[in-house]
Image: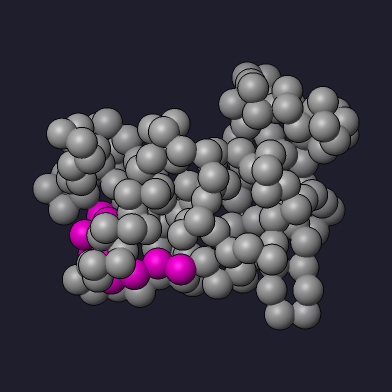
């Protein structure tokens, strides 16, 4: 994973390629795990010594990935874990990946550090656009902080 500070991203839009659902393990918080188990059954998750994950198919893709000929979608939508809602963004209170000045993002007088996984195909690099800075990025931050659950700008809807 190669991350870059948010300030190097011109725009982001989910292009429904499914890469995030095919190449990354999704760690579940305990309430997310419990919700998925209650709704779908225990066989849709996988345990490790200290964590729970979304189960993967034999080809490595997420068990909830739904694919058409041209697009990929998450069939969880209403039960989607926070890690999935936030990908490709990494938002924290500390500069975990360096470049702290370029990664600094202020939200309601709170200093955060926002990074982006550069492997995402929906990224466009450059000076942040107004749409990205004032609409898309704040939605990711609100989801990360638990202020918002629904996604509008930060997902591809079927």
The image quadrant that residue 48 belongs to is: top right
Image vertical order of residue 46 relative to residue 102, above or below: above
Residue name at image x 63 percent, y 63 percent: 157
Image vertical order of residue 1 relative to residue 41, above or below: below
Residue 46 visible to the viewer = no
Left or right: residue 22 compared with residue 6: right
Image vertical order of residue 150 relative to residue 51, above or below: below
> Where residue 126 sits: x, y (%)?
23, 73
Residue name at image x 31 percent, y 64 percent: 132
Left or right: residue 126 compared with residue 69: left
Residue placed most toward the observer, 19 or 80? 80
Instruction: For the C terminus, give its image quadrant.
Output: bottom right
Instruction: Reply yes or no: does residue 7 show up in magenta.
Output: yes
State the colouring used for the structure image: one colour
> Where residue 150 sits: x, y (%)?
54, 45
Residue name at image x 72 percent, y 47 percent: 76
> Where residue 130 sits: x, y (%)?
23, 67
> Where residue 29 sits: x, y (%)?
59, 26
- Residue numbers of the magenta segment: 3-13
Image vertical order of residue 52 relative to residue 143, above or below: above
Instruction: For the N terminus, give its image quadrant.
Output: bottom left
């Amino acid at each position: 994973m190669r991350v870059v500070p948010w300030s190097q991203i011109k725009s982001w839009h989910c292009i429904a390629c499914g890469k995030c659902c095919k190449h990354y393990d999704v760690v579940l918080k305990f309430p997310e795990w419990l919700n998925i188990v209650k709704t779908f059954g225990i066989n849709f998750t996988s345990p490790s010594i200290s964590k729970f994950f979304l189960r993967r198919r034999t080809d490595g893709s997420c068990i909830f990935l739904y694919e058409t000929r041209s697009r990929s979608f998450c069939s969880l939508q209403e039960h989607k874990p926070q890690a999935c809602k936030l990908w490709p963004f990494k938002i924290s209170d500390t500069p975990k990946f360096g470049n702290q000045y370029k990664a600094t993002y202020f939200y309601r007088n709170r200093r955060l550090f926002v990074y982006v996984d550069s492997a995402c195909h929906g990224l466009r690099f450059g000076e942040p656009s107004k749409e990205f800075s004032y609409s898309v990025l704040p939605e990711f931050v609100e989801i990360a902080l638990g202020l918002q659950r629904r996604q509008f700008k930060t997902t591809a809807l079927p």
